[in-house]
Image (cartoon, rainbow, N blue to C red):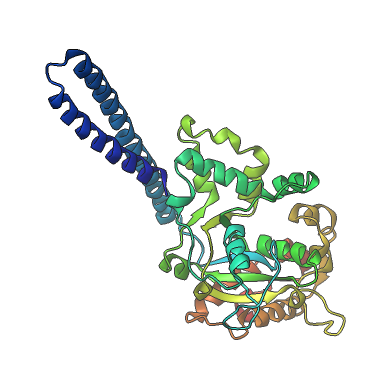
Amino acid sequence: MALRRRCLLFADRVNYADKILETLMAETEGKSQRAEEIHRLVKDLRNILDLAERAASDVSAGKENVDAFMNRCATQSPPPPYIFRAERHGDPFPRFKDDFTGELVSSFASDMHACYESVSESEIMIATHLPCDMSHTVSDLVGEVVMHLKKTQINERRASRAEERYLSQLILLSGSFRWALHTTCLKGRTATEGQEAGLAIFDTSKIKASGIHLWRVRDLLTFFQSDTKFDSSRIDHWAREWAMNSDEYVGWDLVPKSALVQFLPYERLVFRSDCPDDYFLRTDFVAAASLGDFKKRFSSPAELLTVDQYRSRVRSIVMKLTYQCPVKDVDLFLEAMVEWFSDPASWGYELNGDPNLRTMF
């Protein structure tokens, strides 16, 4: 139960006690010592009632301010039409077959949501939490975001101490295709038996239509910095840099499958000896520890390609991205892809001449 509701419930109880004491005051009229004690108690209870009502009002106002600010940011700078997630099914909990369908569950959900599914051994296709339930105050929301951004480091420390892992109630998504694709490679390289890594692409408008909150982390950080009482100093430089580099968004609890445009397994993204001409990503890109590492160590010198060779490699990945793709507005999807592949140098390639990417689709 959220803090505001607890405050209001407490206020109702105090108000009820206040009425009882007023009745006792009337009954003890003329008994000065007893009446005076009850009068003081009534006064104290009314002070508590006032504090509880103000606390409920402050919590409500804080939440409304966050919502209003984030909605304004989304209006001024809308999220991209498609958003991405580097997924690894089976992490942090082993995959299981749904009791009803008999198929392996492949949700796109927060750690906490995945935990509930693992315990129930069935797919839960609705959000089990709302933002108002997850974070009682704006300061609590800051704390939740801090823990989420530092989740990897937190769990590494906990694992070294044999402590229970931290389960985030948020799900990470990215507005950067290139960042999400590289992170998918990282997860694919380190996947263990029973896990499946891949790149998930979602239709942002369908996420919004489902009622799931989708907030850009850089906008959240701006709001947190707007008032010292939120104590945004808890979010360190590295966490901020991570959020900026990945153009990170956070979703609440899960992303519905109804918003899924494509899920491309890691194995179909990388070079395969049995299909030597059917790949786009350089092996150096796949092996790099980070995009910064790729830029420093591998992209210079860039791999020199003719325009036709680059077009062929782009077509290879586009065919995979559009295979059985349930996109109504295909032109919008292809237009987005032009942006994703418009800078060959960012992928480690150098071309002779203008590739004219729009002719590739």
Q: In this view, does 16 lie to the left or right of 202?
A: left
Q: Residue at x 60, y 79 (%)?
A: 99
Farthest residue to the right: give it.
273
Query: Which quadrant of the figure has residue 110?
Result: bottom right
Q: Is residue 211 left or right of residue 332?
A: left
Q: Is residue 269 left or right of residue 256?
A: right
Q: Is residue 207 placed above or below 102 in the rendered structure?
A: above
Label count reads 0
Q: Which residue is drawn at 61% across and 81% down?
A: 322
Q: Which residue is drawn at 48% across and 64% down?
A: 127
Q: Residue at x 52, y 53 (%)?
A: 216
Q: Is residue 8 placed above or below 213 in the rendered structure?
A: above
Give percent across and percent down for residue 170: 56, 55
Query: Which quadrant of the figure has residue 346?
Result: bottom right
Query: Which quadrant of the figure has residue 269?
Result: bottom right
- Is 290 or 55 nearer to us in this picture? 55
Quadrant in which the C terminus is drawn? bottom right
Give percent across and percent down for residue 349: 77, 66
Give percent across and percent down for residue 126: 48, 68
- Is 202 or 161 nearer to us in this picture? 161
- Is 305 or 115 nearer to us in this picture? 115
Give percent across and percent down for residue 32: 17, 13
Q: In this view, does 341 lie to the left or right of 220?
A: right
Q: Is residue 353 placed above or below 322 in the rendered structure?
A: above
Q: Is residue 235 placed above or below 77 in the rendered structure?
A: above
